[in-house]
Amino acid sequence: MASYYSGFLGCEEPHFLESCSLCRKHLGLNSDIFMYRGDKAFCSNECREEQIESDEAKERKWKKSSRSLRKNSSETKESAAGNTVRTGTLVVA
């Protein structure tokens, strides 16, 4: 079977259009390919949607932790202004 990447012999990684980015199912030459963010190919709309949901959940988690860090930072500044210093450990994920 011809490969999308057949012109580059010796390459270790397959071309992004050869397999689904989520389930790794082979993407046939005559099958539909569902794209996401320009460089991620999926075998079905379901795989694509699952990746989108996963990315959105990561983004929400990141935004939530970012807000928490800003809130903790402002509390520390307010305490420092009143000559009281709050110390603690800051964990960044």
Image (cartoon, rainbow, N blue to C red):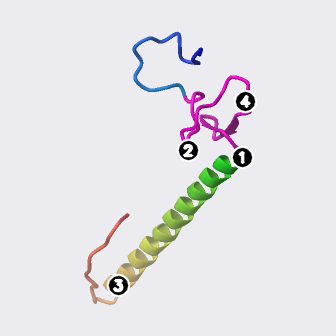
- Viewer-side label of 3, 4: 4
Residue 77's x, y, as percent? Answer: 37, 79
Q: Label 2 neighbourhood size at 10 Å, few (<14), some (14-19), many (20+)?
A: few
Q: Label 1 neighbourhood size at 10 Å, few (<14), some (14-19), many (20+)?
A: few
Q: Is residue 76 above or below residue 50?
A: below
For disc 3, the marked residue is: 81
- In front: 3, or 88? 3
Residue 55's x, y, as percent? Answer: 57, 55
Q: Is residue 17 above or below residue 68?
A: above
The dot on residue 23 is 2
Per the rendered image, the range of residues in magenta is 16-45
- Viewer-side label of 4, 1: 4
For disc 1, the marked residue is: 45
Three-letter amino acid code at disc 4?
Answer: Ser
Three-letter amino acid code at disc 2?
Answer: Cys
Asked whether the beta carbons under mark 3 and mark 2 sit within 8 Å of each other, the answer is no
Q: Is residue 29 above or below residue 40?
A: above
The dot on residue 31 is 4
Residue 32's x, y, as percent? Answer: 74, 33
Instruction: Calculate the distance from the C-alpha at mark 2 to the C-alpha at mark 1.
Output: 12 Å
